[in-house]
Image (spheres, coloured by chain):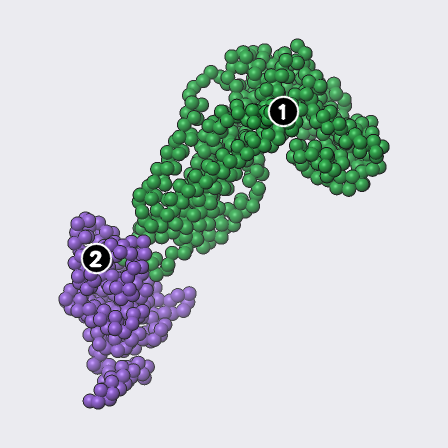
């Protein structure tokens, strides 16, 4: 079966500074991949090459087997869900209008958009009465739930998330992360999530891709990476959740 | 009894026409300004390379005083019109609406441009990225996200532009465009303060109403309340339609009309009314274009935009023909008659019979105390005295000629609106002023005109000029023929004073009727 997302020797430089060394990655359908690494590792740039928000300087991106280089950028992005780090809800639109923006751009009729919006509010566990509100009237967690609903509105098969829970408190964060994993399974999505939180990556993802200085330095299941890795940088990164888990067990007196 | 108020009453009948033109002009300038500045602002917001030069240029235009900007467009358009005449056989009017429209458009652009750029560049980058991320094209991002979010800032710019434009439109009067400024310029000239106030209040009320309606639209865009901005828009549309309605009557075809011009002082208003009355007496339709700048008036006549007006031989000799010599009164008149005809086709129909010469005047008591009777006497005392001139005097060749001939060196020089110049003489802020020999205030204020033994000041016979296009117009010639040498300087002084005096003043039209009764026909 064709992989959902293929990055083939993709590279990118800004003003002469290399952000992505030639990087390659193949993600089969249905997988939940976490992109981790320090800041400046190139995670977000890599994510953005997938839906064309960043145009690679070289190499090829293929979505469901089709190279994106020849595709119309806006049309491509309407097919791929995207959850932004800073949420990026449109402040002049209501919650319902925010959620319905991609279907609107795709020219769905109003009734279809309305029923889809209601369905999505249920899906992301928001009360339906928030539909008419402006995003400014919502809490941080609610806002990001709207962000997830907006990303899923036009029934994409691929969901990209750029540090989606970064700004949330830990309770809200855990609840939303669980819901996202549930949606991933329920809707058979292919999900790529950028995060700097290794524990979150370990708990949610099927596969962790570790990046450093624009290169993929490790790529394996959470279990395998926790067991140990020859690269000292990867090892250092994976130390943190291991140590946390050990501390927790100790305190709980197991 | 206060006849200042009485003379105001007929003017209010002109309000609807002046308001109509004022509104039409401001609305057209604002619409044109929006049409240019809004897309330019969008481009400038997208391209930093375009942003700096466009904002700098708009800012530069803003620093040009609006009166000067309006005045600069006249010669520019006149040149273009002559080019067009050469190329297509058709010119266009360089006077009135067009120069006013262009200058006001330029003037309205800066606040719209600046606020559009500020509004668009101020949109949260996270929201802009989200717009791209959900698959909006550049155009969709602009219309669905950036413009709606920037709309309140842009509308604030439009409000500023509207208030500026409505205020600056009063300055279109001197380039021959009817506006509420007609009240202000005429009122200032004849010291009819009620008239000045009428112009100011009318223009201020107009600006306030428009500002409030635009404010309604601004709040509507901010709250995304369609009823609010709909109401504002409807209010503007209805107001525009009602205000401009009187112009529809003007546009209807009419018998050929004559346009009588006047410069910006009382004598000119009176003589224009006198000419207009005589034409109307012959059944002609007459439009008056008053408050024209001195240089504007002659060019407008040569271009056929006005049909007749009164100018002065010395002014034409020096400013139009560029002559610095003074061959004497008769020679100047004869020279003008042939030269103006040859050069521009302008007909010097007749001298009116009086002179309105530049003369230096002092209060009689002051002149006697200093022992000054002529300009030669004045030269010795000048270093201790202040000279007051009207707005153009010190830049005129006559001043250069007098200054050089007598070696005049004053302690200080000050410029005044003519009305205030006479006041300054009374209050001692000026010791000597540039007066006009036909000014009624010379006799009324007990001033003496200083002698000119060296003949440095050229003659200023009032002459009736007719446009080339009307050179053979029977009706015009018949109507004005009787004015040949018909006005004595005393009659003119009296008429001028009846308009200029502080109490019991009359409107120029009334003074013209009184003057007509005294013609030496």
Horizontal and vertical percent position of residue B509: 58, 20
The residue depicted at 21 percent of the width and 89 percent of the height is A253
Q: Residue at x 67, y 36 (%)?
A: B416
Q: Color used for chain A?
A: purple
Figure check: B140 above or below A67: above
Q: Secondary structure at mark 2?
A: helix
Mark 2 Cα shell of 10 Å, populated few (<14), some (14-19), many (≥20) = few
Label ID, residue B209: none
Which of these two is toward me, A184 or B345? Answer: A184
* Callouts 1 and 2 close, C-beta under 8 Å: no
Closer-to-camera residue (B481/B228) = B228
According to the picture, the residue beneath numbered tag 1 turns out to be: B504
The answer to which image quadrant residue A228 occupies is bottom left
Determine if residue B234 is in view: yes
Which residue carries the number 2 mark? A129
**Image quadrant in which the N terminus of chain B is located:** top right
- The structure residue drawn at horizontal position 78% and vertical position 28%, both measured from the top left corner, is B448
**Visual hue assigned to chain B:** green
Q: Is residue A75 visible?
A: no
Distance Cα–Cα, label 1 vs label 2: 75 Å
Chain that bears disc 1? B
- In percent of width and height, residue A5 lies at 22, 66
Q: Say if B291 sits above or below A137 in the image.
A: above
Dot 1 and dot 2 within a common chain: no
Q: Position of residue B72 (x, y in %)?
A: 57, 36
Give residue A220's position: percent from left, percent from top: 23, 78
Indicate the quadrant where residue A134 lies: bottom left
Number of numbered discs present? 2
For the residue pair A62 and B305, the one nearer the viewer reads as B305
Circle 2 marks a residue in which chain? Answer: A
């Amino acid at each position: 079966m064709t992989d959902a997302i293929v990055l083939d020797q993709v590279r990118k430089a800004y003003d002469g500074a290399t952000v992505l060394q030639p990087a390659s990655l193949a993600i089969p359908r249905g997988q939940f991949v976490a992109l981790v690494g320090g800041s400046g590792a190139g995670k977000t740039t890599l994510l953005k090459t997938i839906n064309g928000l960043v145009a690679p300087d070289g190499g090829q991106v293929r979505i469901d087997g089709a190279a994106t280089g020849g595709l119309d950028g806006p049309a491509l992005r309407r097919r791929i869900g995207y959850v932004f780090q800073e949420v990026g809800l449109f402040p002049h639109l209501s919650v319902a209008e925010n959620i319905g923006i991609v279907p609107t751009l795709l020219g769905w009729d109003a009734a279809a958009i309305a029923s889809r919006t209601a369905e999505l509010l249920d899906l992301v566990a928001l009360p339906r009465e928030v539909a008419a509100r402006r995003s400014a009237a919502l809490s941080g967690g609610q806002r990001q739930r709207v962000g997830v609903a907006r990303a899923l509105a036009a029934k994409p098969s691929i969901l990209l998330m750029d540090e989606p829970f970064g700004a949330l408190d830990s309770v809200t964060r855990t609840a939303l992360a669980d819901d996202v994993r549930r949606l991933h399974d329920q809707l058979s999505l292919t999900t790529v999530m950028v995060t700097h939180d290794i524990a979150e990556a370990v708990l949610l993802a099927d596969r962790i891709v570790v990046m450093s200085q624009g290169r993929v330095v490790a790529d394996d299941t959470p279990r395998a990476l926790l067991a140990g890795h020859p690269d000292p940088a990867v090892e250092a990164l994976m130390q943190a959740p291991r140590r946390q888990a050990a501390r927790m067990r100790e305190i709980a007196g197991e | 009894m206060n006849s200042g108020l009485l003379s105001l009453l007929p003017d209010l009948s002109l309000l609807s026409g002046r308001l109509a033109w004022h509104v039409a002009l401001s609305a057209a300038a604002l619409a044109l300004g929006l049409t240019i500045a809004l897309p330019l602002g969008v481009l400038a917001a997208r391209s930093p390379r375009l942003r700096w030069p466009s904002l700098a240029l708009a800012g530069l235009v803003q620093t040009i005083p609006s009166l000067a900007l309006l005045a600069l467009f006249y010669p520019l358009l006149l040149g273009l019109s002559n080019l067009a005449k050469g190329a297509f056989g058709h010119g266009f009017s360089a006077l009135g609406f067009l120069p006013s429209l262009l200058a006001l458009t330029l003037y309205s652009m800066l606040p719209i441009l600046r606020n559009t750029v500020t509004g668009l560049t101020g949109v949260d980058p996270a929201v802009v990225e989200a717009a791209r991320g959900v698959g909006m094209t550049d155009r969709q991002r602009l219309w669905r996200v950036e413009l709606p979010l920037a709309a309140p800032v842009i509308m604030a710019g439009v409000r500023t532009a509207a208030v500026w434009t409505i205020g600056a439109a009063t300055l279109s009067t001197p380039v021959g465009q009817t506006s509420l400024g007609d009240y202000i310029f005429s009122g200032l000239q004849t010291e009819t303060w009620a008239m000045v106030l009428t112009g100011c209040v009318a223009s201020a009320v107009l600006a306030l109403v428009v500002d409030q309606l635009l404010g309604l639209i601004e709040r509507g865009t901010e709250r995304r309340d369609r009823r609010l901005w709909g109401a504002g828009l409807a209010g503007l549309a209805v107001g525009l339609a009602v205000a401009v309605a009187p112009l529809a009557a003007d546009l209807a075809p009419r018998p050929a009309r004559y346009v009588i011009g006047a410069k910006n002082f009382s004598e000119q208003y009176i003589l224009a009314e006198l000419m207009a009355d005589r034409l109307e007496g012959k059944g002609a339709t007459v439009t008056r274009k008053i408050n024209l700048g001195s240089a504007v008036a002659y060019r407008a006549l040569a271009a056929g935009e006005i049909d007749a007006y009164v100018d002065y031989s010395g002014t034409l000799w020096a400013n139009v023909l560029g002559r610095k010599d003074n061959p004497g009164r008769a020679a100047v008149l004869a020279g003008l008659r042939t030269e103006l005809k040859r050069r521009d086709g302008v007909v010097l129909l007749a001298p009116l019979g009086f002179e309105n010469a530049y003369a230096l005047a002092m209060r009689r008591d002051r002149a006697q105390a200093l022992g000054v009777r002529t300009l030669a006497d004045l030269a010795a005392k000048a270093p201790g005295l202040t000279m007051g001139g009207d707005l153009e005097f010190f830049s005129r060749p006559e001043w250069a000629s007098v200054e050089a001939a007598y070696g005049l060196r004053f302690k200080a020089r000050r410029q005044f609106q003519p009305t205030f110049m006479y006041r300054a003489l009374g209050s001692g802020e000026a010791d000597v002023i540039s007066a006009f020999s036909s000014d009624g205030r010379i006799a009324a204020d007990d001033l003496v005109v200083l002698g000119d033994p060296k003949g440095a000041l050229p003659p200023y016979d009032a002459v009736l000029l007719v446009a080339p296009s009307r050179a053979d117009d029977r009706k015009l010639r018949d109507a004005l023929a009787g004015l040949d040498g018909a006005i004595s300087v005393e009659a003119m002084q009296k008429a001028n004073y009846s308009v200029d005096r502080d109490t019991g003043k009359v409107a120029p039209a009334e003074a013209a009727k009184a003057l007509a009764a005294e013609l030496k026909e």
